Amino acid sequence: MRFAEFLDAEWKPALGCTEPAAVAHAASLAAAQGSGPVRQVRLMMDPRTYKNCHAVGIPNSGGRTGVLWALALGAHLADPSLGLGCFAAVDGAVLAAAQDLMDRKAIQVEVEASRIELYIDCTVVREGGRGRAVLEVEHTHLARLEADGALVGGSPVRSGPGGLPSVRAAVGAMGIQDLRRLAATITPSDRQRLREGVAFNLAMADHGISLLPAGFVPPPGQDRMTRLSRLVAAGVFSRMSGEPLMVMSLAGSGNKGITVSVPVTLWGREGGHPQARIDEALAFACLMTSATTHHLGTLSAVCGAANAAGIGIALGILLLEGASPAQMDLAVANMVGNVAGMICDGAKIGCAMKAMTGVDAAFRSATLALADFGIPATDGIVGADGDASLANLGRLARRGMTGVDTEVLDIMQAKL
């Protein structure tokens, strides 16, 4: 695999939370198959996508939140090519049309509990035709596109375990040291793309400082670990609030992109490491985050920012500091033995605290590993090496926590 292929698939710009953005993108695709006023919008979705749309802010919407607004706005966005950046096109006219749709209660949403992978099936009925768009497994994979019932586009996912063949699956099948070697192959173009994403995510983090209590993020030169973890929290808080700044998402998640890129980059800069070394560390951190996401599932019962991105941070820091393969295994053991089981209860501003916890844990895991200390394989779900620990973490998330999402959704719905 070339690292550029990984970037094409996993390092993507996004405006707002990726799940409501994917819902709006599907609505925009469906709406483009007809013409005239929008009469009705229907959506069938998987439970985890619903969970991540429940309370999160939508950019450029005047503070609106939730899946109904994502649908109402998406059905009036004329350019489906914007993908996960579609909320950039929201303006006064789109808001007014969406408000009319909401007032008419012309939106229907159902959750298909049997779906365990991302599934967004949206139908938009317009005066001049009906369109249907189905996204599956990955946020922008168009599995089916219909116009008035006729198939006009899309590529179905293959059947069987794992669903859509993907770069993420290929990365997830590689060992930690294979991923480290892949990170060392990055080209000048790859480095530029990584740096562009870092600039997006640092800008979101800096913007978020103004939304949090004064002094929450210490100034440079004071307690680097605390400052960097809180800077990540500021970025995630800002994004989950719906602030209209683009971020670079990683493995289908803008929060993972922020959580990985901000601390690894600033740790390297403030530690005096060469930029080329920082690029490689970030590349490795991104690969580890995607590999862990593959084990957990695209949308998981556990928090991806704490678990997947946290492991990515720990390994990126260890690459910067010249750690051995054995020390990298220890860092993974420290993470898996510590934050495994932190649940995902949807996308919302509270994700900022979970991301901050994940970054704190990553710093501790990495520094302990550099001192050759790690949770032993005899403990809990920790494996004999880093690869085995990741496999055990994935087993816990995919099989052991299958009832978590049902309870989370029941609690959410009881609050409505």
Image (spheres, grey):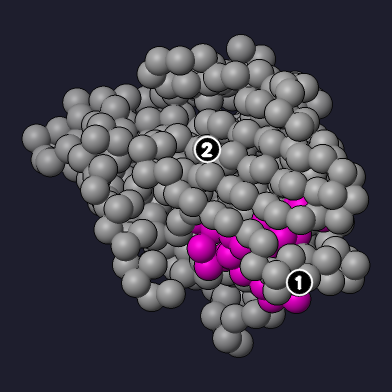
Q: Marks 1 and 2: which is nearer the front?
A: 1
Could you say whether the residue bearing mark 2 is in a helix, strand or loop?
strand
Image-based side of 357 in relation to 262, left or right: left
Secondary structure character of the magenta stretch overall = loop
Image coordinates of residue 55 in percent, x first then y, are: 53, 67
In magenta, the rendered stretch is: 52-79
Image coordinates of residue 162 in percent, x first then y, are: 43, 21
Farthest residue in the left direction?
378
Tell me which residue sits at (72%, 46%) in the image: 124
Tell me which residue sits at (46%, 56%) in the image: 51
The amino acid sitting under disc 2 is Tyr
The amino acid sitting under disc 1 is Gln
| 170 relative to 220, above or below | above
Image-based side of 261 in relation to 389, left or right: right
> Is there CB contact under 8 Å for labels 1 and 2?
no
| 207 relative to 4, above or below | below
* Foreground of the two, 3 or 16: 16
